[in-house]
Image (cartoon, grey):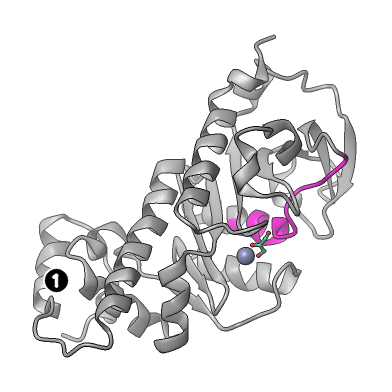
């Protein structure tokens, strides 16, 4: 059996959480990541027949029975994942009853997965239904994106359009746009269901006045989506109070999307 501390998926979780913390997106216990793993790969590092303990999920995950995830722990700080991954992360498998998670590794202080695990798993199910290659769901509190929530209408079309205007590459990076939810109570199944509903349509979902969710095939894709939104939101917050002299026009965004061959939300442009 190989050493789990050398597993690429553990390394990716360590690097990504450290990066997100360094960028100021994950203060205190803010943020969470779940990463769908390949059973064969996990089997090289862990005995798949050895369940440390079981943890109730609190909702029905029948659609993903047997799937294995590495997930950040509840109350844990991204700041600390790199130095103590076994305490701050866990590898869990959805049990045959679809109602419990089987802990295969981690949460070494008796902890459990993030309180946002319902939103994560429901989002995984929603993304997998439209993209079978989806692996990652990521949540964080990026500073400028959050700041923008207070001064910009929380409307999907308007929010997406404003961000597309802020950097030339935005419409190419997230042509599917951004779903927006109003402020809702976090940690609940209801916000999970609402997020998953949006995830059928979008890889990015803003939680009004809270943060953002991203989903993708790889850690890089998912991180890159949020990073691009955050960059655009930063440009917006640096310029929103100043007279606008230049802008990227809708015809230019259309030109970009067509040149790069992306399927974009035509209804989010005003043409
Ligand atoms: O886990 O970010 O939304 C901490 C959070 C909750
Ligand atoms: Zn949060």
Range of magenta residues: 110-123
Q: Residue at x 9, y 77 (%)?
A: 251
Provide the secondary structure element on which disc 1 rests: helix
Relative depth, front residue between 145 and 193:
145
Viewer-closest of 28 and 99: 28
Q: Provide residue 130's location: percent of width, then percent of height.
A: 48, 55
Left or right of residue 73: residue 49: right
- Is residue 68 visible to the viewer in this orientation of the structure? yes
Judging by the rendered image, the residue that carries numbered circle 1 is 254
Q: Residue 49: horizontal and vertical position, in percent? A: 83, 21
Q: Is residue 207 above or below residue 29?
A: below
Quadrant position of the C terminus in the picture: bottom left
Number of marks in picture: 1
Name which residue lies at 70% across and 9% down: 1
Q: Quadrant of residue 265?
A: bottom left
| Residue 221 position in % (x across, y down) | 39, 46
Farthest top residue in view = 1
Drawn side of residue 244 relative to residue 173, left or right: left
- Residue shown at the point (58%, 22%) measured from the top left: 7
């Amino acid at each position: 059996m190989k050493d789990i501390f050398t597993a690429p998926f553990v390394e990716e979780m360590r690097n990504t959480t450290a990066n997100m913390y360094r960028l100021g997106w994950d203060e205190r216990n803010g943020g969470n990541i779940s990463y769908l793993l390949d059973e064969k790969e996990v089997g090289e590092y862990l005995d798949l027949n050895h369940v440390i303990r079981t943890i109730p999920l609190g909702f029905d995950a029948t659609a993903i029975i047997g799937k294995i995830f590495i997930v950040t722990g509840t109350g844990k700080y991204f700041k600390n994942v790199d130095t103590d991954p076994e305490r701050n992360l866990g590898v869990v498998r959805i049990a045959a009853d679809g109602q419990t998670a089987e802990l295969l590794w981690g949460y070494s202080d008796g902890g459990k997965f993030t309180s946002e695990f319902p939103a994560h798993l429901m989002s995984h199910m929603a993304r997998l239904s439209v993209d079978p290659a989806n692996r990652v769901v990521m949540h964080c509190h990026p500073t400028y994106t959050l700041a923008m929530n207070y001064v910009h209408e929380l409307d999907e079309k308007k929010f997406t359009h404003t961000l597309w205007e802020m950097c030339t590459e935005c419409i190419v990076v997230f042509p599917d746009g951004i779903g927006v939810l109003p402020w809702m109570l976090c940690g609940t199944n209801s916000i999970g269901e609402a997020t998953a509903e949006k995830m059928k349509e979008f890889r990015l979902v803003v939680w009004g006045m809270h943060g953002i969710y991203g989903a993708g095939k790889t850690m890089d894709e998912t991180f890159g989506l949020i990073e691009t939104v955050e960059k655009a939101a930063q440009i917006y917050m640096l310029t929103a109070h100043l007279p606008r002299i230049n802008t990227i026009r809708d015809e230019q965004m259309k030109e970009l999307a067509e040149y790069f061959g992306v399927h974009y939300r035509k209804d989010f442009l005003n043409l």
